Amino acid sequence: MNLDTTKSLRAVALAAGLMFAAQTLWAHPLGSLAGGFAPGFAHPLGGMDHVLAMVAVGLWAAQRGGRYVWLLPMSFLGVMLAGGLLGVWGMPLPAVESGIAASVAVLGLLIAMAARLSALPTLILVAGFALFHGHAHGTELAAGSAAAAYAAGFATATAALHLAGLALGASVNRLATLRPLLTVSAWRLSGGVIALTGAALFTATL
């Protein structure tokens, strides 16, 4: 195994370790959160459900390549902010926790299968999942808190997780010219682990 392959595998292992470093499965504590940038930034990082889904968006974007590298993360961010606004306004959205868990499972499965959906269903799927994540962020903001700074915080954390997924995906893609079969295995492994975790999270919401 040459040096480039070793570096790529180390990057994959490091990113995978970071994905699973969250201390709790759920990013939805009891009670309301204070507003401001720091609580907003910390919220998506506090649970495996948000972390895996947002990293998975970056992974799938990297796997798809081309315009999807920016289109998927930007679409997720935009709709997530809209969902956060709905949550702040107190507008109900059914089965939020199940929707978040399903996003982890489905995105992981799509990565494992190297799914190549056309643009419209891809964007609808990502946007739908983003709405659930954003609503969860918004509903947990305490009334009268600094909503704008809080939204900037969770949007920044989400963008960072998307970039982590893109970086991990780029590392996997670099293996393609060196070890094509290893690249396929890496996608299947990363997607499969995410999908199985999402399935477990979804089961816990039933």
Image (spheres, rainbow, N blue to C red):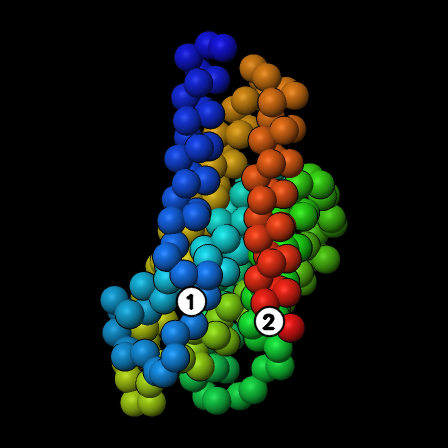
In the image, residue 142 sits, relative to residue 105, either above or below, namely below
Q: Residues within 10 Å of mark 1 (few under 14, many from 20)?
A: many
Q: Position of residue 115 (x, y in %)?
A: 71, 43
Residue 199 falls left or right of residue 138:
right
Classify residue 35 by image quadrant.
Answer: bottom left
Tell me the residue at 41%/61% (across/down): 24
Name the residue that disc number 2 marks. Answer: 205
In the image, residue 144 sits, relative to residue 84, either above or below, namely below
Is residue 60 in view?
A: no
Q: Position of residue 71 (x, y in %)?
A: 56, 51
Q: CA distance from mark 1 to mark 2?
A: 14 Å
Which amino acid, mark 2?
Thr
Tell me the residue at 60%/71% (across/down): 205
In the image, residue 67 sits, relative to residue 104, either above or below, namely above
Mark 1: secondary structure: loop
Farthest top residue in view? 2
Mark 2: secondary structure: helix
Which amino acid, mark 1?
Ala
Residue 27, numbered circle: 1
What quarter of the picture does the C terminus occupy? bottom right
In the image, residue 59 sits, relative to residue 177, either above or below, namely below
Disc 1 or 2, which lies upstream in sequence?
A: 1
Residue situated in front as seen by the camera: 26 or 179: 26
Q: Position of residue 34 (x, y in %)?
A: 27, 79
Mark 1 or mark 2, whichever is nearer to me: 2
Is residue 16 in view?
A: yes
Tell me the residue at 56%/15% (across/down): 178
Q: Residues within 10 Å of mark 2 (few under 14, many from 20)?
A: few
Residue 22 falls left or right of residue 125:
left
**Contact, mark 1 vs mark 2 (Cβ under 8 Å):** no
Tell me the residue at 47%/44% (across/down): 165
Classify residue 75 by image quadrant.
Answer: bottom right
